Image (tube, coloured by chain):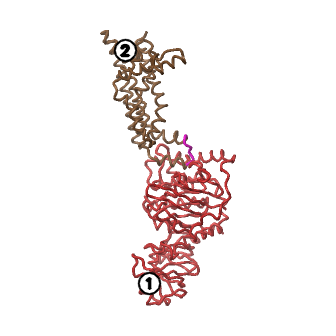
């Protein structure tokens, strides 16, 4: 097995998680930014929980719920005949929950800071609701989306505790970069640990640099 | 042809909009009133941006909303053009994309809608429904006289035509964020026109602009209205804009329409608050007959005679709006022979209002008829007593040329109609 396998698993996990989070997070963030319901604070608190909980605590509860004895894990087992814990699917579910606030909050901020005017104007220019979303809301909140994507992706890439709890550490299946590095260090294989770590460091830096440059570009354009 | 009729009751925290209106489907209707009178709310209700608890709106033969029938046509399905105060352009689009945003959608929707079945069953217009203040009826008269142009209402105006008409060519290459307020507003107006709306709604479109930009925007509006006769509902609190633009005036106070009618008659009606304002003015249209270059004067003819104004760079035979403030008009019993005032016209006193208002204590308003043109004069009560002015008396009115204001918004060129 290649040393790069954990890296590949990490990227795949982060990518899948980010896409799922955007699909769930965008409508939820939009709703949170417009709603006046009294449940708003409640929902916001739940969304923000992963920010404050130790990853191991989150991982522990996920293990229980997703495990074959837990109600989700049990239902999944009945439906598909396979287990959720210690699989890639289980990792994705865990990561989605773990990185939830990192995607929701930038999106919600972007939507909340958005003026009513462009939306009203687009409506008077015959744009339907869906059309307005695609041609006005999305492009005008692209900085928010950029932040959400980057934070969601990199945060998933760096997770350790949750993955360890519900993914186990199965090489080639659920062993991600962060855990792999930990393993190498435990086995005193500093060279391998360094290769992986340095790769991740460079990757993260390049991503952030791109994002901040893009942000600056849009800021100059006044978007 | 149909008008724009309806009624709305919109309750906001400490504000109630309660209006019933009937607006002609040609010309410019100015919704006039102080800030907070509910002018913008009315406009937003018509566009569908507000959803009033009670309301009904008919635009020509289409029902746009009817609370009783639980029908509300969403904004994007209403054929409105809306121009906001600040001339908002989408910052993520180019100037051209901004112009085409509504244009392409309106055309697509139209094609989709021609299949019919859009309107709910429209009940026959109930003419006996709550009638407006009595002067309301006069509003229709104008609609009848110029009805022949209505057929062009729905005609499409192409993108190329608009760009050429408004000389927007050089703006197309510029960045949206680099445009001045006036340039933005011109593009915003063109963008609204390009959707070929049934009615164009303008919410204080020039209040944030300097004089020169205002002129540009008015010119732009005028050019487009030469091409299509889309009715315009124009909200403003500025006397000057109202006097320049209004064919019809809808006057609002505290969420209610307190007067509505043709500008020429409404402004001079002594029982209405407009004639008692400090800015009280009369308006009429006059045709340019000649330019007197040596003296720097322009001659215009109207029903009362020929009026001289400081030289204006306008073509002969074109028609222009002239407004005269009540406080710039004075009255004499005999025709003044030796006077510095050029504009002297014979007139008949039709009405005198001596009810004293706080701000004009000691003054009174005199309404005069100049062979069909109504003028207002504000004079002191002492003068009135001294000259013994009474209704039906023949007098002479004097107007200072320098006090005259020619509208920036030029009316259509007469020769076109001939």
Is A58 located above or below residue A109 in the figure? above
Examine the residues drawn in magenta and state their main secondary structure.
loop
Q: Which residue is mark 1?
A: B340
Magenta residues (range): A125-130
Q: Colour of chain B?
A: red
Depth order, front residue of B208/B100: B208
Depth order, front residue of B59/A203: B59
- Which image quarter is the N terminus of chain B in? bottom right
Disc 1 secondary structure class: loop
Query: Does residue A155 appear in the picture of this structure?
Result: yes
Instruction: Give the class, few, some or many, for how many residues have Cα within 10 Å of label 2's Cα (few <14, many ≥20).
Output: many
Residue A66 in the image: state x and y as whole percent. 45, 19
Q: Quadrant of residue B277?
A: bottom left
Is B159 located above or below residue B297 in the figure? above
Disc 2 secondary structure class: helix
Instruction: Give the class, few, some or many, for how many residues have Cα within 10 Å of label 1's Cα (few <14, many ≥20).
Output: few
Query: Does residue B167 appear in the picture of this structure?
Result: no
At 35% across and 23% down in the image, what residue appears?
A: A55
Left or right side of B206 for B198: right
Residue A78 in the image: state x and y as whole percent. 53, 17
At 54% across and 78% down in the image, what residue appears?
A: B374
Is B267 located above or below residue A106 in the figure? below
**Badge 2 and badge 1 both on one subunit:** no
Left or right side of B228 for A215: left
Q: Which chain is brown?
A: A
Q: Quadrant of residue A193?
A: top left
- Which image quarter is the C terminus of chain B in? bottom right
Depth order, front residue of B246/B34: B34
Q: Which residue is mark 2?
A: A180
Q: Quadrant of residue B318?
A: bottom right
């Amino acid at each position: 097995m290649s040393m790069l396998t954990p890296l590949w698993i990490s990227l795949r996990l982060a990518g899948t998680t980010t896409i799922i989070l955007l699909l769930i997070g965008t409508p939820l963030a939009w709703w949170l930014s417009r709603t006046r319901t009294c449940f708003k604070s409640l929902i916001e608190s739940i969304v923000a929980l992963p920010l404050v909980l130790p990853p191991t605590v989150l991982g522990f509860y996920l293990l229980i719920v997703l495990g074959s004895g837990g109600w989700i894990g049990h239902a999944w087992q009945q439906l598909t005949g396979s287990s959720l814990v210690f699989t890639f699917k289980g990792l994705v579910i865990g990561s989605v929950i773990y990185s939830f606030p990192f995607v929701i909050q930038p999106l919600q901020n972007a939507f909340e800071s958005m003026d009513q005017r462009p939306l009203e104007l687009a409506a008077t220019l015959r744009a339907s609701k869906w059309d307005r979303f695609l041609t006005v809301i999305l492009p005008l909140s692209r900085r928010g989306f950029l932040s959400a994507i980057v934070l969601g992706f990199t945060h998933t890439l760096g997770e350790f505790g949750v993955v360890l709890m519900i993914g186990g550490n199965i090489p080639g299946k659920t062993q991600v970069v962060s855990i792999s590095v930990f393993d190498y260090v435990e086995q005193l294989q500093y060279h391998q640990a360094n290769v992986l770590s340095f790769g991740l460091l460079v990757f993260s830096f390049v991503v952030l640099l791109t994002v901040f440059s893009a942000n600056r570009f849009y800021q100059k354009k006044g978007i | 042809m149909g008008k724009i009729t309806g009624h709305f009751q919109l309750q906001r925290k400490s504000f109630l909009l309660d209006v019933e209106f009937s607006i002609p489907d040609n010309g410019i209707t100015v919704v006039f009133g102080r800030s907070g009178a509910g002018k913008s709310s009315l406009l937003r209700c018509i566009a569908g941006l507000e959803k009033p608890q009670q309301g009904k709106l008919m635009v020509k033969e289409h029902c746009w909303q009817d609370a009783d029938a639980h029908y509300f046509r969403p904004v994007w399905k209403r054929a409105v053009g809306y121009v906001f105060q600040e001339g908002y352009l989408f910052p993520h689009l180019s100037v051209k994309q901004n112009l085409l945003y509504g244009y392409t959608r309106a055309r697509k929707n139209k094609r989709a809608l021609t299949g019919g079945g859009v309107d709910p069953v429209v009940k026959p217009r109930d003419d006996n429904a709550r009638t407006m203040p009595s002067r309301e009826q006069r509003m229709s008269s104008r609609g009848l006289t110029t009805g022949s142009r209505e057929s062009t209402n729905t005609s499409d105006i192409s993108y190329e035509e608009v760009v050429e008409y408004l000389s927007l060519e050089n703006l197309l290459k510029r960045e949206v964020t680099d445009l001045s307020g006036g340039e933005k507003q011109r593009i915003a107006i063109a963008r609204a026109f390009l959707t070929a709306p049934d009615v164009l709604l303008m919410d204080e479109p020039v209040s944030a602009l300097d004089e020169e930009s205002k002129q540009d925007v008015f010119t732009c509006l005028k050019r487009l209205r030469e091409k299509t006769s889309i009715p315009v509902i124009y909200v403003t609190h500025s006397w000057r804009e109202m006097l320049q633009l209004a064919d019809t005036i809808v006057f609002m106070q505290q969420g209610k329409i307190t007067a509505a009618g043709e500008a020429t008659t409404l402004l001079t009606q002594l029982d209405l608050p407009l004639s008692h304002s400090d800015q009280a003015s009369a308006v009429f249209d006059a045709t340019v007959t000649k330019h007197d270059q040596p003296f720097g004067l322009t001659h215009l003819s109207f029903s009362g005679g020929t009026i001289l104004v400081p030289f204006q760079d306008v073509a002969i035979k074109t028609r222009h709006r002239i407004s005269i403030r009540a406080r710039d008009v004075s009255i004499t019993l005999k025709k003044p022979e030796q006077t510095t005032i050029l504009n002297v016209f014979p007139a008949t006193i039709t009405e005198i209002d001596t009810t004293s208002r706080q701000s004009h204590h000691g003054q009174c308003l005199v309404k005069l008829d100049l062979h069909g043109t109504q003028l207002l004069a504000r004079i002191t009560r002492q003068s009135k007593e001294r000259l013994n002015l009474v209704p039906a008396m023949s007098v002479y009115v004097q107007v200072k040329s320098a006090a005259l204001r020619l509208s920036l918004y030029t009316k259509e060129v007469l020769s076109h109609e001939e």
